[in-house]
Image (cartoon, rainbow, N blue to C red):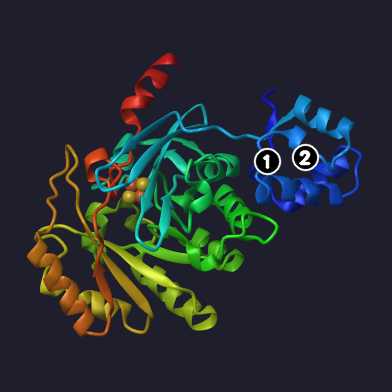
Amino acid sequence: MDPRPLFGMTLHELRDLAGELGHKPFVGSQLAHHLYQRRVANFEAMTDLPQALRQRLSDEFTLGLSPPSRVDASIDGTKKYLFPAAGRFVEAAFIPDEDRQTLCLSTQVGCKMGCLFCMTGKQGFQAHLSSNEILNQIRSLPEGESLTNVVYMGMGEPLDNLDNTLKSLEVLTSDWGLGFGNQRVTVSSVGLLPALETLFAQTKVRFALSLHNPFEDERRQILPVQNVHSLTDIIAFLKRTQRIDGRRLSIEYIAFAGVNDTPRHVKELVRLLHGLKIRVNLIRFHPIPGTPLAGSDEAALVRMRDALTERGIPATIRRSRGQDIYAACGLLSTKALLRPVIEDF
Ligand code: SF4
């Protein structure tokens, strides 16, 4: 059996582990301090633990830190890292800006959701990432110490891997963990309703809904998940909960020429989002092979942004980052790299 990784365990799990090893629970708190605050690179550096315990930890466990196996750098400063995970690979995009350093991380190898415009969706689903594998993308990122924001918007649907997503969020946002403020963490989802309710009940992080079309029947054409989770129910849930907890919400909206960027769509968006305090991020579409969709032009994006803003819904046009290295929104995919792995089975 592979040694269990410690990085990615919650405080509760580390305290239980201390008990299993015959130590008091506070030893678990010491482990959390070494793992998440001191970010030690080996068990020997945990110098306040008894030597026998350090030895046992290095014999039977691993920290679970895996450096990226490849990096591609964009001319705009964005970097795409390839991390080993679940016996395969996932990608994470590091996006530096003037006032923030953001990591867009992955939660699954591939994805089951099959969104028509997404390279990851075309790859199909291969595996869920563990909390260790999700958080390793932060810990083993060369720029990890300088990160200001983390977005769960890379490969995979975070709410389809709910337990591991929640566990990673607990470690990421707790004082005993990596200590990221909830306002610096955003989870994005197509809206898997029961899982979304759990996410809101257990975390205070920001939430971004991948909407892409305000009409249910039209949304179904590009997001097959609409067949299971209705937009009306999702928006009703967001309205109910935002009234109670004031959650910071945003909409991700990839604009497709003639498909979802018309005045009719703006009007319906305004109607649908009425009563929500929410920002709409308009995203340029980066064409992928085998899709009939084309991106809206600049003029259409500006028209949408202005029309929404005039009607009281703040909207911005998201700047494309890392397009030349396929790190931009919807372009993350490890299909080519997966092929040799898949063929080995
Ligand atoms: S857009 Fe997100 S949910 Fe849809 S297929 Fe791509 S990774 Fe999955």
Residue drawn at 23 percent across, 45 percent down: 323
Three-letter amino acid code of the residue under disc 2:
Met
Q: Where is residue 188 in the image (x, y as percent from the top left)?
A: 41, 58
Q: Residue beneath label 2, please?
A: 46
Separation (CA) of disc 1 from disc 2: 7 Å
Q: Residue beneath label 1, please?
A: 40
> Which quadrant: the C terminus?
top left
Which residue is most to the top?
344
Residue 133 vertical position relative to residue 211 in the rendered view, above or below = above
Q: In which quarter of the image is residue 58?
A: top right
Let me know if residue 248 appears in the view. Answer: yes
Residue 331's mark?
A: none
Q: Position of residue 297 (x, y in %)?
A: 9, 59
Residue drawn at 53 percent across, 50 percent down: 145
Three-letter amino acid code of the residue under disc 1:
Val
Let me know if residue 267 appears in the view. Answer: no
> Which quadrant: the N terminus?
top right
The earlier-in-sequence mark between 1 and 2 is: 1
The secondary element bearing badge 1 is classed as loop
Q: Where is residue 261 in the image (x, y as percent from the top left)?
A: 14, 66
Residue drawn at 35 percent across, 22 percent down: 339
Q: Work out whether residue 220 or residue 161 is closer to the camera in this orientation and state it.
A: 161
Cβ atoms at labels 1 and 2 below 8 Å apart: yes
